[in-house]
Every structure is written in C-alpha cells, then in structure tokens.
Amino acid sequence: MTQKYTKVRGMHDILPLEISKWQFVERVLTDTAKFYGYKEIRTPLVESRSLFERSIGSDTDIISKEIYAFKDRKGRDIALRPEGTASVVRAFIESGMSVEKKVFRFYYYGPMFRYDRPQKGRYRQFYQFGVELIGSNHPFFDGEVVAMLHTIAEKLKLNGYKFLVNTLGCSNCKTKYSDIIKDYFSGRKNNLCNDCIKRIINSPLRILDCKNPGCKQSISNAPLIGNILCNDCLYHFQKFQEYLKVNNVPYKVDPYLVRGLDYYTRTVFELYVEGDENAIAAGGRYDNLINQLGGPDIPAVGFAIGMERLISLVEYNTPSEPLIYFACIGEEAKIKGTKIINELRKEGITAETDYKEESLRSHLKTANRAGANWCIIIGEDEIKREEFIFKDMLSGKQITIPFNNYIKRIKELLKC
C-alpha cells in the first residue's frame, strides 16, 4: 500500500482559498511600512546558533526548549531563525551600514521556527512581519513604531484593540530591578512553577511573563520598577507616553509587562485585541544589542507581528476575479484558442480552459464550476466564419466577436 504523507506536526499549509486574505494583509503591512519610510531587508532562514544564544539569551525558553538547531556537514552549530531581530542586526553590522551616522528603518517578512506546543494560531513554522528602527534613542521613535502598529490595526479594522506598555529601564535600572525581583521571589518559591523557580537565578524578570495561575498570583504583589527608575528612564517613558497621547494611540501602562527576550531595555509594548488573551504584536527598545553582537554602540527599537494570529482576527471577503473560460471544440479550435487565451492573459485578463475533448455542454458545466463570468466558444463553424461566441454566463446573453479585433472588443465588454 502506498504511504500517505501528512504535514509534519506543527507545520501548516496556506491553501489557495486563504491566500488572497494573506496577500491583502501583507499589502497593508508593507504599504504602511513604506509610508513610514521603511525599506525591506531579507535575511537567511539559517544562522549560527550562537547568534541567537547571544541576542535572545541562552536561558530563555526559545533557546533552551524551542530552537531548531543542528550541525551541518562541517560540524558547525547552526539554527533555523526563531525571530527576526537578531538576523537584521547581524546583517546591519556585517554589511558595513553600522558605520553610517544616520537613522535606518527596515522591515522584514518571512517564516520563523520554534519547537513550541502546537495549538490554534501557534505553529512550529510561523510567519512574522517586523520592523527595526536603528540609530537613535529618542523616545519619540518608540512612539513612532507603536503609532505604525496603531495605523495597521486601524487599516485592518481590528475590533477593540489596545496597547499595553511599560519600561524595563536602562541597563543599570534593569539590573537593579532584576535583583529586587530575585529577592522577592526567592522567598515565594512554593507558589511558583518549576520553570519560574529556575528563572530566579538567571532570569528573574521572566517570571513576570509567566502565565501559570500560581505564578500570576505572586506577580500581582511584586515590587514595581517605577519606584527605582533613574531620572533619564522616567523622562524617556514620560515622553514616549506623550507621543502616544498626542497621536491618539489607545494604551494602558502595565507595570509588570516584560518581554521574553534578554535584549530589551526601556520601552516594551504589546498589542492585544479584545477577547484574545495572546498578543498579536509586541516589541520594544534594544539599545545594547548591536554592541553585544560586535557592532558599534547604536540604539534601536522595533516590533514583530505574529501573522497567523493577525490573519485570524481580520475580516475579509475574497473578491471574485472576472474569469473567462474557453470552450474549444475540435483540434483546430484548440490551436486557435491557445493563441487567443494567451493574448488575453498578456493583457491582464484572467482566462483558463480545459484541453480535454469534451462537448460544449460539458465545457459549460466546467465553466460554471470554475466560477467563470464569461465563456468564449470556438468550434468548426466559428473557425470558418473567423469569429467566436462570447457568452455571459449569468444572463445567458451571447454575441459574436471577429478574430481580427477581439482584444479591444473584450476589454470594452469587461468594463460594462
């Protein structure tokens, strides 16, 4: 018995019926990014594993549990990219762009890979759209990337969306706060899950991101970072919020919001839609990452959108494309039909046919199943008269069109 193949667990197909919705959302994202001055960058799916260990953090769940890593034929440790920022930063440094003293705006789009538990809207190969603004630490740039997400949410007509925002402080403030959180949870291990008990030592702030009910109860009384922020960090967060208010971006400060990646400093944010407990987009500032990956000391901020989650929330009706079906009866008609059908396609008119030898009745049934708006009929009689029949499939009305002027005439009829 021939083996029947199925998708690898955690992977998913995007079928033709879904593609037009994906393409619609993709156009909104890329067009919005271009309006904000962002340029596309494309990076490889495969990078050195150490790039992600260095950027994301070797103790994160992504690296310790979820990364797709393996050795190549030369024994080098490589990995499928689990997120986009590290690759963009690596390309930024390697290309020499990092020596230029200016602000860079990049956007990227493509598949990422994490060995996560598959569930609705979450896959092991998933798609991300993201932006990176590199070259300035001004808080208004933090506001700009959030405002771009706000614009995207408006264009896609997302219902009841809001932003949660917070600050993790600069490196000094973040380290100080980490120590406070470490001390706080060290005395509350009995209420924590096993993962968070391990996080106390190397990544205490990530406890604040845990969704375990017991951990969430302990988190609700944890110390707040706002009490220990330096003046510069307080000013930065205030100016960031000022930008959001002026631009009417709906937001709420969540004092326990952190991100699951080590490289974030100061501003962090997430985008939620009412009724959905998972963020559909998230990001923040990462002022030290470029330097940590071997580049100059250049600040940056960005975000990433989980496409599968976003797509599931967008309402979209697939538009029907006008389609002409060719019913060619006989070999000579098929030869003549191939020339006409390809000329129409060159003119941007959607057309298709079936080259099997069938009766006109069978052809018309095929045209109906294909959803054709019109049918061009060519048989022996039409070849002799050097014309074809142009049939409206909805009304049944039909006219004849001569072979010598069909493109102009068909374009006129399609506009009616």
Image (cartoon, grey):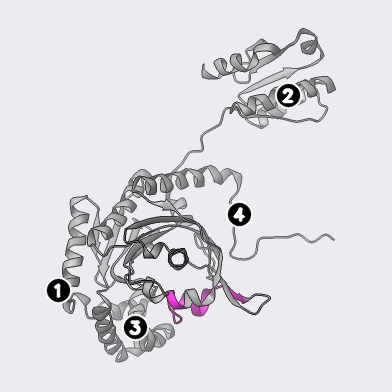
Instruction: Categorize mark 4 by other alpha carbons within 10 Å: few (<14), some (14-19), many (20+).
Output: few
Residue under label 3: 204
Q: Which residue is drawn at 18% across and 61% down?
A: 239
The residues tagged by marks 3 and 4 sit, at their Cα atoms, a distance apart of 38 Å
Front label number (4 vs 1) = 1
Magenta part of the chain: 54-70
Residue under label 4: 13
Residue 286, quarter of the rendered image:
bottom left
Mark positioned earlier in the residue sequence (4 or 1)? 4
Q: Is residue 278 visible?
A: no
What type is the residue that disc 4 sits on? Asp
Mark positioned earlier in the residue sequence (2 or 3)? 3
**Can you give x and y, in whole percent of width and height, for residue 226 in the image?**
19, 74
Q: Which residue is drawn at 63% across and 28% down?
A: 346
Which label sits on residue 266? none
Q: How many marks?
A: 4
